[in-house]
Image (tube, rainbow, N blue to C red):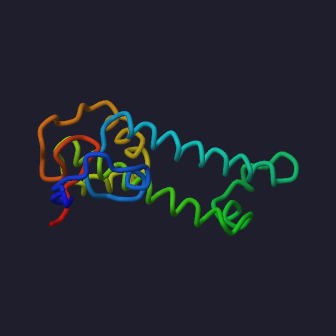
């Protein structure tokens, strides 16, 4: 029995939540995704601190020293930045704003404020151009 294709994905998975900038994401998955990203960042920084012999001087704690300590760290942080950007884009779209505003997370000082404020603004309960409900997206026909 053939079922007609759905026009929306109401139950996307965790890969969508972290990697795709399309759709809407509610507050709870938003915070859970950010918690995962921050735990991974914390683990990477902890591994880096353990790899430094002795107590590091403030002069030794530089981005280039961090990147040079393990060649995978820059790649890891590039991937994590993509995850953060995708999550923030979907959250802006969930509250009915343009995902373009997500570029604010690249501005030092403003980024933390944007992430926190987005986590407390309630979702639009009606459909918008990005999805029918929070945690969903429209499928292209």
In which quadrant of the rendered view does residue 25 lie? top left
Q: Residue furthest front?
A: 1
Residue at 74% from the left image edge and 50% from the top image edge:
47
Relative to 137, does residue 71 appear above or below in the rendering?
A: below
Q: Residue furthest right?
A: 54
Foreground pick, 38 / 126: 126
Q: Quadrant of the N terminus?
A: bottom left
* Residue 68 image position (x, y, % from top left): 71, 67
Foreground pick, 5 / 20: 5
Residue at 87% from the left image edge and 48% from the top image edge:
54
* Residue 115 image position (x, y, % from top left): 38, 41
Residue at 39% from the left image edge and 50% from the top image edge:
13
* Residue 87 image position (x, y, % from top left): 37, 50
**In this figure, what is the number of numbered marks?**
0
* Residue 122 image position (x, y, % from top left): 24, 31
Q: Quadrant of the C terminus?
A: bottom left
């Amino acid at each position: 029995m053939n079922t007609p294709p759905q026009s929306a994905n109401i139950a996307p998975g965790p890969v969508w939540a972290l990697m795709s900038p399309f759709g809407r994401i509610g507050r709870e998955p938003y915070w859970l995704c950010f918690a995962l990203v921050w735990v991974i960042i914390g683990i990477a920084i902890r591994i880096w601190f353990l790899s430094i012999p002795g107590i590091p001087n403030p002069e030794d704690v530089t981005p280039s020293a961090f990147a040079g300590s393990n060649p995978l760290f820059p790649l890891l942080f590039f991937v994590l930045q993509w995850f953060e950007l995708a999550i923030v884009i979907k959250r802006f779209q969930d509250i009915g704003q343009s995902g373009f505003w997500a570029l604010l997370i690249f501005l030092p000082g403003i980024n933390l404020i944007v992430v926190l404020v987005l986590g407390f603004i309630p979702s639009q309960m009606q459909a918008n151009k990005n999805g029918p409900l929070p945690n969903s997206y429209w499928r292209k026909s």
